Amino acid sequence: MLQKKKTMVVLLTLIISVFFTIPTYASTLPSITRLAGADRYATAQAIAQHGWTQADYAILAYGGNFPDALSAVVLAKKYNAPILLTSGSSMQDITKQTLIALQVKSVFIIGGTVVIPTSIETELRAMGIAPTRIAGQDRYETSVNIAKQTTPSTELIVATGEDYPDALSIAPIAAIKQIPIVLVPKNYLPDSVKTYLSTINVNKTYVIGDSSTIEDSVAKQFTNPERIVGADRYELNIAINKEFDDNFNSDSICLATGEGFADALTGAAYAAKISAPMILVNSVSPANTKDYFQQRLPKGKNIYVFGGTGVVSDSLIQGLSDSTQNNYPCSNKILNGREIAKLLKPSIVYIDIFDSEGNDLGAASGVIASSDGKIFTNYHVIDGVSRAKVTLSDGRVLDVTNISGYNPNYDAVVLKVNAHDLQPAKFNFSSSAQIGDKIYTLGNPLGLEDTISDGLISTINRVIDGVTFIQISAPISPGSSGGALINEQGEVIGITAAGLTDGQNLNFAIPYEDFNSINDQDLNMSLGSIPSQKPVPTSSLTKPVDLNVSQKLEVNGFDSNYSAEITVEQVIRGAQALTMVKNANESNTLPKSGYEYLLAKINFKLLDIDGGKSLYVFGEADFNLVSQNGLVYNQTGEVEPDPQLDARLYKGASNEGWVVFLVKPDDTKPKISYGVNYDGTGGIWFKAY
């Protein structure tokens, strides 16, 4: 019955017009047409039905992630094909109906069977549509195989495959000029790309982005490389449009959000079809974006907006044409820490995770995203997890029923619980914030309810291993993965993810934009069914180790895999522990009220590590891994490892030392919690609980 209802809604959607005209704000504005739907799949349909009345070909791309389809816009232009999206084991009804309505005869499936399974091919054949799959071993080989299907050109475009804005900004002009787009990683040239280069004859290569995106050593391997650069995705987008402005012979302008890939991907095919520039926008339009828009405005009779008002608002469009600064904060009221904690408490949850045998794997935090049970947290929290439960602020404990959306590249996942009365947080794009703004973090570290910290935004766009973070000075404690990063208006602008504590105060969060881009995937996948990935840098996931029990510790590290073994060799607590601490250094303080010292002598052996890298073992906050002759307890939160242990461990090496913990005197069975810290090579922290 549920499926029938869904089909009826889809059919009604096809009958009712899916695009509409927004009233113009001033006489100087051209007609504004918004092409949007309830989600990315419906938006793709709206764009396709507006741009094509009939199409022999269509491109079918995975709607859950960007890498495979970034190069497909050039192919779409060659075959006059719209780009549609799909996910799961069967096509969305709305996608099927669009294929039927456009009388599509052939479909290019972009990507391998992991993202678009063979069952989709079966569906297409049953509809009388011939599928052709274009795929490779990775995103780079896929881009090469797409390039082989495009019209031969004496020029080539090279863009990063580690993020989407650069390739999508160049996609319309690449399609108009029929220049293939090849994706590369930052610091090496894949064999598939090398082989492709040996088979083509080009005399010019456009390299999109600066050396922080594609290193010079990579760019120099292409013929006559010319870089097009910008300070961020928006400046780069405008730089690209200005570079090729003479190629736009259209009287139209296209707008798409730069904070998600889906609408810009499907919209780029239409922008190329009508030879129009596609301008990427966010909630606060940069000056050069506004300048370029106003420069194009006298030529434009039509503005096409890809996506709903939640991603490209009406006020943003009006602001682009205004001469005044376009900045629309959701609230001007400044809240203090107490007010923010009270406001957000009902929206922060505690997440327990378990393996298939019911063993406790650790804990993390989450932020309620919708009243009907959607919860944002980090992807690494549920990577390899079979079961999870969520504890709400009112004490209710709910099982996680499914994964609604995820993107391991962003370290982002949307969990779903069975509830309809939750209090979601209020969100705002991180682009509304500026360096130096005061922020707060709120989560449940190590089971401590509603722990709040404050600090400043250090930078908005810190890129680590291809992932963009918000860097903040507010400390992120272990167990706070998935907690909220909050501005002074009480709006969540990011989800906390990582803390680097190698003598520094570096902490990170995933921008809200990355979670918003997966919020409408509605995948309905079970825990444990998503592919296991290396997590992005994080120190926040905790796992228990029983004292006096030797255990093997498996850890995924920063761009590496680590395998280590922990052995707790000796435990001393109480008065004897206090004596040892004071004897080590007379300046060491007494434990805080209600606690006593527990010293655990731990042997840490690094069994294996990728690529000849090393691991740095230390404690964090008010504890340190130190030698027996240099016990340290530091209440200030600064990490100062003993010099004897302030060294990297390599494969096969081991070291032992005393870890200083704080425990309650009546706690007869304390456990050690451990996790991963990152400073570019990695490290392990410990804490008792």
Image (cartoon, rainbow, N blue to C red):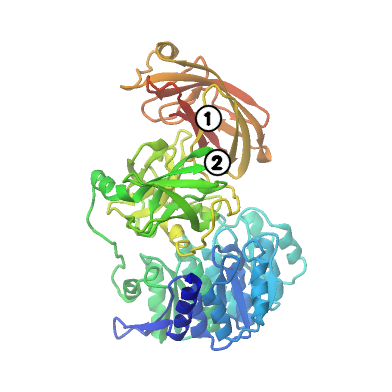
Determine if residue 459 is in view: no
Judge whether 462 appears above or below 561 on screen: below
Q: The C terminus is located in which quarter?
A: top left
Q: CA distance from mark 2 to mark 1?
A: 25 Å
Q: How many marks?
A: 2
Q: Which three-letter amino acid code belongs to the residue tagged 2?
A: Gly
* Residue 206 vertical position relative to residue 466 in the rendered view, above or below: below
Residue 296 position in % (x across, y down)? 42, 80
User: Around disc 1, counting alpha carbons within 10 Å, would you say few (fewer than 14), some (14 to 19), or many (20 or more)?
Assistant: many
Residue identifier under label 2: 680
Amino acid under disc 1: Val
Helix, strand or loop at label 2? It is loop
| Lateral position of residue 618 relative to residue 511, left or right | right
Residue drawn where x is 68% and y is 78% of the image = 125
668 shown above or below 66: above
Q: Residue furthest bottom?
A: 53
> Within 10 angstroms of label 2, few (less than 14), some, or many (20 or more) residues?
some
Q: Position of residue 158 (x, y in %)?
A: 62, 65
- Helix, strand or loop for disc 1: strand
Q: Which residue is mark 1?
A: 545
Q: Classify 634 as above or below 349.
A: above
Outermost residue on the left side: it is 333
Pair 2/1: label in front: 1
Q: For this rendering, which residue is in front, 324 or 480?
A: 480
Residue 192 shows up from this direction: yes
* Residue 234 marker: none
For residue 309, what is the image quadrant? bottom left
- Camera-side residue: 166 or 606? 606
Q: Residue at x 29, y 65 (%)?
A: 328
Task: Point out residue 257 in the picture as x, y percentages from the top left corner.
Answer: 44, 68
